[in-house]
Image (tube, rainbow, N blue to C red):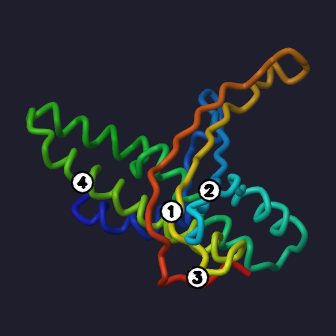
Amino acid sequence: MKFKPFTDKYVDNFFRQSWHLFAPEPLTNNYTMFVQVKLRNNNTESEWYNITDPLVRANNDSVFTPYNRMLRVGLGYINSYNLGVTDVLTVKIMNKSLEKSDDTSRYDELAEITQSEVEKVLYRYASSYAKKIYDEKDIDKIRILINSTEAVPYSKRNDKEYQPEENFTTLEWKELNNNVVAFP
């Protein structure tokens, strides 16, 4: 437990695993990340570009592809941003220890630091994709939109009227990260 906050920053985002894949509580959301670019010359805002779907398609085109790792890294950090970086077992252990003490400040502090670090990585990821679309000199700022769509329950799979719930999180405008290369 002592080193978990540090190791999770690396391991969890690359190898996120969860027993929620199985019943009775399977995974319930699909995440998609978008980037929007604010251009330098006239302060124009671009359309939202879907980062996730093109990577999924590129990954599905070939068994051996660098897109697989790029996709897993991105989705790992998107999941961390939306779900937090703690798994269910860790939350149970932390709650058990909090029962003994009402001081949640350390837990809250770690969660806030980790959330901030995840957000930095998401902006690096989005900066790399923005550089694929636009010349780096033309980009002033970027912002991120994360879409969370509820998975269609098995019982509703044939219901044409069923509309899954969607939630959108829009992050603020930030400077383009110059320390990343463009997506291939």
Spatial CA distance of label 1 from label 4 is 18 Å
Instruction: Give the structural element (helix, strand or loop) at label 3.
Output: helix
- The residue type indicated by label 1 comes to Leu
- For residue 23, what is the image quadrant? top right
Outermost residue on the front side: it is 42
Task: Give the mark nearer the N terminus: 1 vs 4.
Answer: 4
Task: Give the mark nearer the N terminus: 3 vs 4.
Answer: 4
Q: Quadrant of the N terminus?
A: bottom left
Q: Which residue is mark 3?
A: 137
Within 10 Å of disc 2 (Cα), the crowding (few <14, some 14-19, many 20+) is: some
Q: Position of residue 62 (x, y in %)?
A: 88, 74
Relative horizontal placement of residue 145, taking residue 51 as reference (left or right): left
- The residue type indicated by label 4 comes to Leu
Relative horizontal placement of residue 24, taking residue 54 as reference (left or right): left
Q: Which residue is mark 4?
A: 110
Spatial CA distance of label 3 from label 1 is 21 Å
Within 10 Å of disc 4 (Cα), the crowding (few <14, some 14-19, many 20+) is: few
Spatial CA distance of label 2 from label 4 is 35 Å
Q: Position of residue 94 (x, y in %)?
A: 25, 42
Q: Which residue is mark 1?
A: 122
The one of 17 and 124 positioned closer to us in this rendering: 124
- The residue type indicated by label 2 comes to Glu
Q: Are marks 2 and 1 in contact (CB under 8 Å)?
A: no
